[in-house]
């Protein structure tokens, strides 16, 4: 009987004490312990925050709220190509001088250097022999056409300005040209060398007036001996920058 | 006190009004004043000042300066010179070198692709004008290449040659292999095929023109100059498949001025 009672009492005590463990928050002194733990935790957190603040960047005072301007960059147009036409006189060696028409295309590589492709045509007059001999014609009409084309390299030098009265100034400059090409004349195409010089004036940024003199040289044996023939040409032209 | 410049004030008054007789010509040319309708690039001066010349070259006098912080509108470019208009409407020419210090409206730097050694190593297109000797005749022609890789390029070359006995035209299609495209002087070998038109020169009998197929092998070198320009020189040995028993061999030497894009 005693044993049963003891077991009952012990069981009651065990149950009650375990209940105390779950009900501890009801006891007033437990609040004190919780407050202490919370204070310790808060201190630890504050320390951690302070440590983090040492390494993190300082908070921004002013937030600018500015959206960066996005700009479209327009393409800059390059106007390096110059196309033109010219008219002048060519003195074809052994023939009379004749009017000559020509076209040019230039590509300006730098302010100093440019390339030029040029071509032109003239109709040669008569040789002295033909004039003196009466009816004898050395060339057919097609063979009398003097056609030249060449590829030259040019060099700009002596840049300057031309003043038209007190209010207008036009940019100008001299240039030298030299190149290789061909001459089609007297029924044959012949290798030719050309060189010359010119002067250009720009009334506007896109219009060029050019005065130019060139010598077109080629070797030919058509009139007896094989010799170098000089064909001096002088012309005035206009060209436009694109 | 300096004497007043003779070229400082006339620029903005430079007009084309006095070209009255050429008005029809002006109307006929569609390019006139296109700049006014296009969107223009605005650049801000960051150097103490920006010099404006009267023409597109270092030899033309400085007629205006633009102060730091002011802007200019870029109208167009000619070689390495830029026609610009200031905020006050004055126009002048600024060099590319001076504008490289300017910045765009968003504060970024103004950049220009002028071509450099990296571009020389790696690019898509090349063009060249060449002159030389083809089988004893003088030749001149043009070349275009397309880069399949930095080392391997497909090329098309057309030329006219003019000799004492024969004139003619050649058109070649081939492949170039550039060994070291990053070297300033880079050697290459070339291999290809083509056609040749031979026109015998004579003043006595009517000549008969002939077309032949050719094949060639050659070697050469490319030499980088500046910006996007280089020199190309090469030697080629052409075999001309004539309609006789023996093929003809023609040697070719040529040099040219080339550029890449």
Image: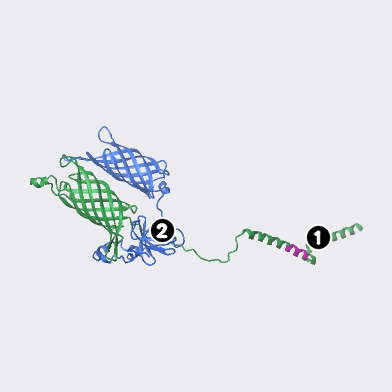
Chain colours: A green, B blue
Q: Is residue A68 covered in magenta?
A: no
Single out the residue that lies furthest toward the front. B1
Q: Please name the residue that numbered disc 2 is placed on.
A: B99
Of the residues tagged 1 and 2, which is closer to the observer? 2
Drawn side of residue A146 relative to residue B123, left or right: left
- Splitting the image into 4 quarters, where does residue B88 fall? bottom left
Where residue B41 appears, as percent x and y from the top left, is 40, 61
Single out the residue that lies furthest toward the right. A2
Question: Which of the two residues, A142 or B80, is positioned nearer the viewer here?
Answer: B80
Dot 1 lies on which element? helix
Q: CA distance from mark 1 to mark 2?
A: 87 Å
Label 2 packing within 10 angstroms: few (<14), some (14-19), many (20+): many
Q: Is residue A39 above or below residue B141?
A: below
Q: Is residue B164 above or below residue A242?
A: above
Residue A18: assigned label: 1
**Callout 1: chain:** A
Q: Is residue A145 above or below residue A51?
A: above
Q: Is residue A35 covered in magenta?
A: yes
Which stretch appears magenta? Answer: A32-39
Q: Is residue A217 above or below residue A72?
A: above
């Amino acid at each position: 009987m005693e044993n049963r009672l003891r077991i009952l009492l012990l069981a009651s005590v065990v149950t009650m004490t375990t209940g105390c463990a779950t009900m501890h928050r009801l006891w007033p002194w437990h609040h004190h312990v919780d407050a202490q733990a919370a204070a310790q935790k808060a201190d630890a957190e504050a320390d951690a925050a302070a440590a983090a603040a040492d390494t993190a960047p300082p908070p921004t005072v002013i937030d600018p709220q500015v959206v960066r301007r996005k700009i479209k960059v327009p393409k800059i147009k390059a106007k390096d190509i110059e196309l033109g036409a010219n008219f002048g006189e060519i003195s074809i060696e052994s023939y009379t001088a004749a009017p000559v028409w020509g076209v040019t295309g230039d590509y300006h590589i730098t302010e100093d250097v440019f390339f030029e492709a040029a071509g032109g045509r003239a109709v040669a007059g008569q040789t002295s022999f033909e004039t003196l001999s009466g009816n004898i014609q050395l060339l057919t009409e097609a063979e009398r056409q003097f056609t030249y084309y060449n590829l030259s390299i040019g060099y700009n030098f002596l840049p300057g300005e031309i003043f038209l009265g007190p209010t207008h100034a036009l940019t100008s400059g001299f240039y030298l040209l030299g190149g290789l090409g061909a001459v089609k004349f007297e029924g044959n195409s012949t290798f030719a060398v050309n060189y010359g010089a010119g002067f250009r004036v720009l009334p506007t940024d896109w219009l060029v007036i050019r005065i130019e003199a060139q010598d077109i040289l080629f070797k030919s044996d058509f009139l007896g001996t094989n010799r170098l023939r000089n064909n001096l040409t002088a012309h005035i032209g206009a060209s436009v920058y694109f | 006190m300096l004497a007043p410049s003779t070229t400082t004030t006339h620029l903005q008054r430079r007009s084309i009004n006095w070209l009255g007789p050429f008005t029809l010509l002006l109307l006929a040319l569609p390019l006139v004043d296109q700049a006014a309708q296009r969107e223009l690039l605005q650049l801000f001066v960051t150097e103490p000042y920006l010099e404006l010349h009267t023409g597109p070259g270092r030899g033309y006098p400085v007629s205006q300066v633009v102060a730091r912080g002011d802007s200019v509108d870029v109208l167009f470019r000619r070689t390495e010179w830029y026609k610009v208009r200031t905020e006050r409407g004055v126009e002048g020419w600024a060099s590319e070198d001076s504008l490289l210090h300017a910045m765009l409206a968003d504060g970024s730097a103004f950049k220009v692709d002028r071509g450099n050694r990296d571009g020389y190593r790696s690019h898509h297109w090349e063009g060249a004008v060449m002159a030389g000797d083809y089988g004893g005749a003088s030749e001149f022609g043009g070349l275009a290449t397309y880069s399949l890789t930095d080392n391997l390029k497909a090329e098309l070359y057309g030329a006219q040659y003019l000799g004492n006995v024969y004139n003619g035209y050649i058109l070649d299609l081939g492949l170039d292999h550039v060994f070291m495209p990053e070297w300033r002087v880079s050697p290459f070998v070339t291999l290809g095929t083509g056609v040749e038109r031979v026109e015998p020169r004579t003043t006595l009998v009517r000549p008969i023109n002939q077309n032949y197929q050719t094949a060639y092998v050659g070697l050469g070198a490319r030499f980088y100059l500046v910006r996007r320009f280089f020199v190309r020189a090469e030697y080629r040995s052409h075999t001309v498949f004539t309609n006789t028993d023996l093929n003809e061999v023609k040697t070719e030497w040529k040099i040219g001025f080339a550029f890449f894009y």
